Image (tube, rainbow, N blue to C red):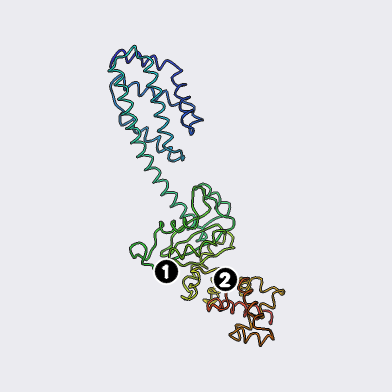
């Protein structure tokens, strides 16, 4: 220790303008710290000046404190770069204040301060970066796991109320979509993931979610895994992107939409059951089964979740309205006779008129009567609807 350094230290610590200068500089150079009150700087400047006077170095206890600060910043989402920048600015101001008192110091004193500040900032940066990264990784893992558990509880029906679900999601930084679609998807070739394991990883599910535009700091989407399948809860607007993404990833899936959040468990049961029972040719068009496919498959398996009449309406949509009776008649004739020409003869129409009506059926229902699987679903639905009318 030198008496000169000690005198300068005492002079600086007694001068309130030191803290003011540090705070003003940080406010000016680090925008993220515009609300900084400077309450921690007296302790920090005292620490550095004390080590300068004694030719000491930052010890383990002090490094633990800096690591704790970095962990806290990771937890509250403040970028570490701003924290370290604030420390560098404070160190520069301290060096300037000491330099202003240079007549009282020797070259050795000035060199000792420079060396201390450089070494201290290097050590602090390394320790805080390591602690920040470790905390961020842990928090991200915890949050991802918590989000998966939230979706697990949704699809298992383990929740007290929609209010409780929303509050739980809000604490995790997500907002559950008011209108959603539930996607259950699986690789066409299960061996392409995870070294041939029959189970897929959460990473694969979140990659699929990212490709669909989900996730983010305040996302409205959730991802989970169930054995060989990914389960994604997406905003309803994301449904249109599903076919292209599944083709790109060589996956297939089933999308259920229109259910309320308290019926996600029903939607999951429908989608999973559809993937279990759908014949291979049901997937060939765009790799995605929809609500109508799932309800028909549930009916065929003897496990419908709605009445047969509702299934008919889900598949046919507006075709059940009386205003569209001519389209339903064209569809019925086509299915019964097997061709547009034969249907035209039965209906006493020109074949082109029948073909036009079949195109309208396809546009309205999103089901092509010429596709074997989609023709079957249309056949089942029109049988239900017409049978109910005749009854």
- Residue 147's place in the image compared with 272, above or below, is above
Sequence-wise first label, 2 or 1: 1
From the top left corner, tell me how far across and down residue 47 is, in percent. 36, 24
CA gap between label 2 and label 1 equals 21 Å
* Other-residue count near label 2 (Cα within 10 Å), few / some / many at <14 / 14–19 / ≥20: many
From the top left corner, tell me how far across and down residue 107 is, in percent. 29, 17
In the rendered view of the protein, which quadrant contains the N terminus? top left
From the top left corner, tell me how far across and down residue 80 is, in percent. 41, 37
- The dot on residue 345 is none
In the rendered view of the protein, which quadrant contains the C terminus? bottom right
Look at mark 1 in the image and give the residue it sits on. 188
Q: Nearer the viewer, residue 259 or 179?
A: 179
Q: Nearer the viewer, residue 135 or 89?
A: 89
Q: Is residue 11 left or right of residue 164?
A: left
- Residue 227's place in the image compared with 335, above or below, is above
Based on the displayed image, in which of its 4 quarters is residue 82 positioned?
top left
How many labels, in total? 2
Look at mark 2 in the image and give the residue it sits on. 292
* Other-residue count near label 1 (Cα within 10 Å), few / some / many at <14 / 14–19 / ≥20: some
Q: Is residue 309 left or right of residue 251?
A: right
Q: Nearer the viewer, residue 290 or 81?
A: 81
């Amino acid at each position: 220790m030198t008496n000169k350094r000690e005198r300068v230290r005492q002079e600086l610590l007694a001068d309130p303008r030191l803290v003011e200068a540090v705070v003003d500089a940080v406010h000016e150079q680090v925008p993220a710290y515009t609300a900084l009150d400077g309450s921690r700087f007296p302790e920090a400047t005292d620490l550095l000046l004390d080590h300068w006077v004694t030719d000491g170095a930052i010890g383990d206890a002090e490094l633990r404190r800096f690591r704790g600060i970095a962990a806290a910043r990771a937890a509250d989402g403040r970028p570490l770069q701003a924290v370290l920048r604030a420390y560098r600015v404070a160190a520069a101001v301290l060096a300037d204040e000491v330099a202003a008192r240079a007549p009282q110091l020797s070259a050795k004193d000035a060199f000792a301060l420079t060396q201390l500040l450089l070494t201290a900032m290097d050590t602090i940066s390394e320790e805080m970066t390591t602690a920040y990264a470790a905390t961020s990784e842990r928090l991200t893992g915890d949050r991802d796991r918590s989000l998966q558990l939230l979706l697990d509880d949704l699809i298992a029906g383990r929740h007290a109320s929609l209010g409780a679900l929303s509050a739980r999601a809000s604490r995790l930084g997500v907002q559950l979509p008011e209108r959603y679609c539930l996607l259950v998807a699986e690789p066409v070739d299960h061996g392409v993931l995870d070294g041939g394991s029959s189970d897929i990883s959460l990473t694969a599910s979140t990659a699929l979610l990212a490709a669909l535009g989900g996730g983010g700091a305040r996302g409205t989407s959730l991802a989970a895994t169930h054995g060989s399948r990914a389960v994604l809860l997406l905003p309803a607007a994301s449904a249109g992107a599903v076919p292209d993404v599944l083709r790109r990833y060589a996956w297939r899936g089933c999308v259920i939409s229109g259910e309320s959040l308290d019926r996600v468990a029903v939607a999951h049961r429908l989608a999973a059951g559809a993937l279990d029972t759908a014949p291979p040719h049901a997937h060939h068009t765009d790799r995605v089964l929809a609500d109508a496919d799932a309800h028909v498959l549930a009916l065929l398996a003897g496990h419908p979740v709605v009445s047969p009449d509702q299934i008919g309406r889900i598949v046919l949509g507006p075709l059940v309205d009386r205003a569209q009776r001519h389209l339903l008649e064209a569809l019925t004739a086509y299915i019964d006779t097997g061709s547009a020409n034969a249907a035209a003869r039965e209906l006493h129409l020109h074949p082109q008129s029948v073909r036009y009506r079949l195109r309208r059926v396809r546009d309205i229902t999103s089901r092509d009567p010429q596709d074997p699987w989609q023709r079957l679903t249309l056949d089942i639905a029109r049988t239900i609807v017409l049978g109910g009318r005749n009854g």
